[in-house]
Image (cartoon, rainbow, N blue to C red):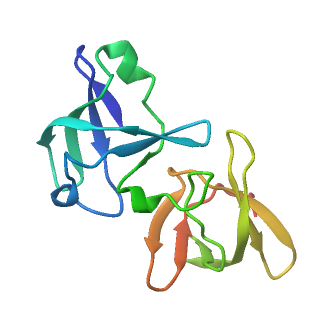
Amino acid sequence: MLKSNGTDGQVLIGLRDFGTEDISETEPVFIDFDGLPVPFFLSGLSVKSGTRFLTYLTDVRSLEDAEELVGRAVYYPAAALDGDDGFRDFTGWKLYDSGTLVGDVLGIEDIPGNPCLEVKTHKDTVLVPLHEDLVTDIDEKKKILSMSLPAGLI
């Protein structure tokens, strides 16, 4: 979710792993609320670019409603949600930080409000925050998760 737009509940959504041509108004998007994916249906889809679109969501009818969604993770399609916790399972994937191998993902530590990847590095096991703002690329075929982590985190 990028930001609210106008005063009647319209929102601007940005995409990472696919383009606006893949969006269907008949399938819901899922918005993360405290680790739980909540479905919202799209209405009045208006493409702004190949990766951004304006839309109305079910039950979002005012600027205040839209502002509650700003900054939350949005998942589409439903297949992006693996597991009961609402987060994709990266277990067995390689984690890279700005092009440098960090290690192998052992699993997800579902810390309320701060899900973390458990990663085995060459020295020890560390927790890495799993936040959409840190993810730079997801390569499904190679099972590589690329992130841009804050300095000193690892």
**Residue 82, position as x, y percentages in the image:** 53, 62
Quarter of the image that includes the C terminus: bottom right
Q: Is residue 93 left or right of residue 4?
A: right
Q: Residue at x 75, y 70 (%)?
A: 119
The relative height of residue 145 versus residue 130 in the rendered view (above or below) is below
Relative placement, left or right, of 154 versus 113 is: right
The image shows residue 37 at horizontal and vertical percentages of 51, 43
**Residue pictured at 19% horizontal, 52% vertical:** 24
Q: Quadrant of residue 51?
A: bottom left
Residue farthest toward the bottom in the current orientation of the protein: 142
Q: Which quadrant of the view contains residue 98?
A: bottom right
Q: In the rendered view, tell whether residue 146 sits above or below residue 54.
A: below
Q: Position of residue 84 (x, y in %)?
A: 61, 54
Quadrant where the N terminus is found in the figure = top left
Task: List the single residue furthest toward the right.
Answer: 124
Q: 132 or 26: which is nearer to us?
A: 26
- Residue 89 vs residue 144, the one in the foreground: 89
- Residue at 51%, 52% (x, y): give it: 132
Q: Is residue 1 visible?
A: no
Q: Position of residue 115 (x, y in %)?
A: 68, 50
> On the picture, is 20 further left or further right than 98?
left
Let me know if residue 46 appears in the view.
yes
Which residue is found at the position 15% from the left and 59% from the top?
Answer: 21
Side of 92 relative to 71 (left or right): right
**Vertical position of residue 78 compared to residue 4: above or below:** below
* Number of marks in picture: 0
